[in-house]
Amino acid sequence: MSSSMAAAVSTLRSLPLPILVPLVASALAFVVTVLRRVLRRQRPVYMLNYSCHLPDADRQCNLEVCEYFGLRSMRYTDETADFMRLIFRKSGLGQETFAPPFIFSGKFEKTLAFAIQEAEEGLFTVVSQLLAKSDVHPRDITVLIVACSMFSPMPSLASMIVRRFKMNDDVKSYSLAGMGCSAGTVGIDMAARALRVQRRPGYALVVVTENTSLNWYFGNNKHMLVTNCIFRVGSAAALITDVRARRADAKYELLRTLRSHHGADDAAYNAAVQMEDEDGMVGVALTKDLVRVAGAGLRQHISTLAPYVLPVSELLRYVYRVAWAYSGGNPKAAAAMVPDFQRAFEHMCIHSGGKAVIDTVGKLMGFGLPVVEPARATLHRFGNTSSSLVLYELAYFEAKRRVRAGDRLWMLAFGTGFKACSNVWRALRDSGPDADNPWNGCAHRYPAALPVPAPRRADYRPPLHEQQLMQKLMKEEQEKEQKLLMQQQQQQLLLQKQQ
């Protein structure tokens, strides 16, 4: 023992007992606290990669296809057809969304065979693409989570994937149903929790889809006809891992998840519900309370999320503004205030389930047009693809090459019940479009092709900085398109000279 250690021990022995006991107890408590934090520290979870399904071009569904199907099926009245035509034109969907295979079969009947075909086309494609570009063998998957709200066959969709890709017999598989559009973010949260409780690091495959083949509504209830107009085909898969050696290959790190359920409220529970109409036709009814319920659920959700993601300066600014409003005798204005989440995230994949929902989220959160642009673009290009929509939005950011290393990204999705779920990510590297990115070949058309939403007031004018930003974005997209056209013309001239 060195002289310094001996001196320290002799000094401790010389201390009176009333002083020595609290000192030793404090030191032991400090050591125990540090050890507990080290031992209970969660393993970091990463998104290695993801893939989104792009159906074949012959599955594209525009207004003409919808009208043709409605007339030939001879199931709808003229009033119903006019209503669906009106909803389609106001929905925010474009002319290049994708419909299920039975729409193009000419049989005008929804059958189990068509539902299986739709599921296999989407699920098998995205899983094959994802495993190939991630350099992961199917037998390396330890957790498999498959989410589809409206279609739950037997054997399950998870079993179909296990059989197709010959996964190990000890894979932990889960099939989620009835979760609505939040199933994608819920599945990622569930995958992270499942990986962290395992003794050894592994891989979790999250596959999300929606199946409209067996859920197409042939009745005349207006609340149930809306789903025919906005829901479209879409599937996605994400590979989640806690293997530290794959951090260099991963795109994003999961920082936080949050789930909130408001099903105790009757209005929230009945906002979107599967039911039978007066004639016994089964469909999903979207009530007029859906937008109001989404706004109320979002307000409660962000009140829980804000302290964990916002900087202290923004929290203090928010508290000051609320206190100032209350002191000025304006409690309604204080209740309507929300923090500025643009100071917490560089990119936001907000729920793009419908034009009204996007408008509500943007108005409540105080987001300008550039923030909600990816959601509007995703709705316009692919429609409401349910649980996979946040991954289609993420693909949009990458197609535009907007994601940089260190950027924070917020995924927000709503689900039936009523549920809200958030995933918070941090980009580990700059990301561009992969070869299977569904926006390849069409991203340059956005946001210029998107219609500007009508303002609520006749005298309303967007702030100057929003106008300048949108003009800058549109100018950049037009310049890219002109360069692409010039390159194509030059290639054609070269070919003509060679001939």
Image: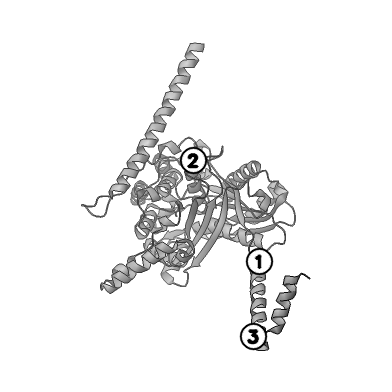
Checking the image for residue 408, the label placed there is none
Tell which residue pokes out farthest to the left in this image: 459
When the figure is inspected, residue 494 is found, relative to residue 11, above or below; the finding is above
Distance in Å between CA atoms under marks 2 and 3: 65 Å
Label 1, residues with CA under 10 Å away: few <14, some 14-19, many ≥20:
few
Q: Secondary structure at mark 3?
A: helix
When the figure is inspected, residue 75 is found, relative to residue 415, above or below; the finding is above
Q: Nearer the viewer, mark 3 or mark 1?
A: 3
Q: Is residue 208 left or right of residue 382?
A: right
Distance in Å between CA atoms under marks 3 and 1: 29 Å
Query: Which residue position holds label 1?
Result: 38
The reply to whether residue 149 is in sight is: no
The kind of residue on which mark 3 rests is Ile
What x and y, as percent, mark residue 305?
Answer: 47, 64
What x and y, as percent, mark residue 169?
Answer: 75, 55
The kind of residue on which mark 1 rests is Val
Q: Nearer the viewer, mark 2 or mark 3?
A: 3
The answer to whether the residues at label 2 and label 3 have Cβ atoms under 8 Å apart is no
The kind of residue on which mark 2 rests is Ala
Quick one: 171 or 474, which is closer to the camera?
Answer: 474
What x and y, as percent, mark residue 163?
Answer: 70, 50
Quick one: 289 or 482, which is closer to the camera?
Answer: 482
Query: Which residue position holds label 2?
Result: 399
Label 3, residues with CA under 10 Å away: few <14, some 14-19, many ≥20:
few
Quick one: 93 or 441, which is closer to the camera?
Answer: 441
Checking the image for residue 19, the label placed there is 3
First along the sequence among labels 1 and 2: 1
When the figure is inspected, residue 424 is found, relative to residue 477, above or below; the finding is below
Residue at the image position 53 percent from the left and 57 percent from the top: 185
What x and y, as percent, mark residue 206?
Answer: 60, 53
First along the sequence among labels 3 and 1: 3
